[in-house]
């Protein structure tokens, strides 16, 4: 986390975790949501579960502004201008409950197969020292360490 964003996970109970993802001014909200889902899948698999259900979500978008100004002095007087620009840093916190598989077909709304999520999102990098190393094992399942 920090000024450039990132993703972190906090354990709430044996089968529940809270995932927080934050971007910077150049990150769109959809990307932040994918980061949160990827981290939820990583946590689910590394803890020996197969599925996760999003129990709740909260918008953690931060809005600030930056002001810019300039002034020029001549023999006729001082002339200046200024403007401010909004800076939007998208963020999201999701609470997940992890479950053992197999996945029912179709999956209920808000429930995800962690292996399938990583199949599609494992190639999307994000910042943060707590990123997990995920790869496909010999049995074809995704393993995270």
Image (cartoon, grey):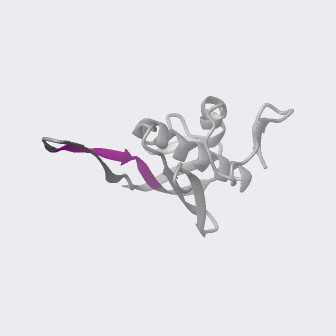
Residue 7: percent from the left, percent from the top?
A: 57, 52
| Number of numbered labels in the structure image | 0
Asked if residue 27 lies left or right of residue 64, the reply is: right
Q: Residue at x 51, y 51 (%)?
A: 21
Residue 34, placed above or below residue 39: above
Asked if residue 75 lies left or right of residue 102, the reply is left
Query: Where residue 15 appears, x then y in whole percent?
Result: 61, 63
In this rendered view, identify the residue nearer to me: 20 or 108.
Answer: 20
Within the magenta stretch, is there residue 104? no
Q: Quadrant of residue 56?
A: bottom left
- Magenta residue check for 79: yes
Residue 9's quadrant in the figure?
A: bottom right
- Residue in view at x 50 percent, y 34 percent: 106
Q: Which residues are magenta?
A: 78-93
Asked whether 101 or 117 is in front, the reply is 117
The single residue placed furthest to the bottom in the displayed view is 13
> Residue 26, percent across and down?
45, 37
């Amino acid at each position: 986390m920090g000024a450039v964003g990132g993703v972190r996970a906090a354990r709430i109970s044996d089968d529940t975790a809270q995932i927080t993802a934050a971007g910077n001014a150049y990150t769109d909200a959809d990307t932040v949501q994918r980061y949160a889902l990827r981290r939820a899948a990583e946590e689910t698999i590394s803890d020996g579960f197969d599925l996760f259900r999003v129990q709740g979500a909260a918008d953690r978008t931060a809005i600030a502004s930056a002001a810019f100004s300039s002034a020029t002095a001549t023999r006729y007087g001082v002339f200046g201008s200024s403007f401010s620009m909004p800076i939007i840093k998208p963020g999201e916190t999701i609470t997940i409950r992890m479950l053992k598989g197999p996945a029912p077909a179709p999956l209920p709304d808000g429930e995800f197969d962690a292996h399938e999520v990583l199949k599609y999102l494992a190639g999307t990098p994000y910042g943060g020292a707590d990123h997990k190393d995920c790869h496909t094992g010999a049995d074809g399942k995704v393993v995270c360490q």
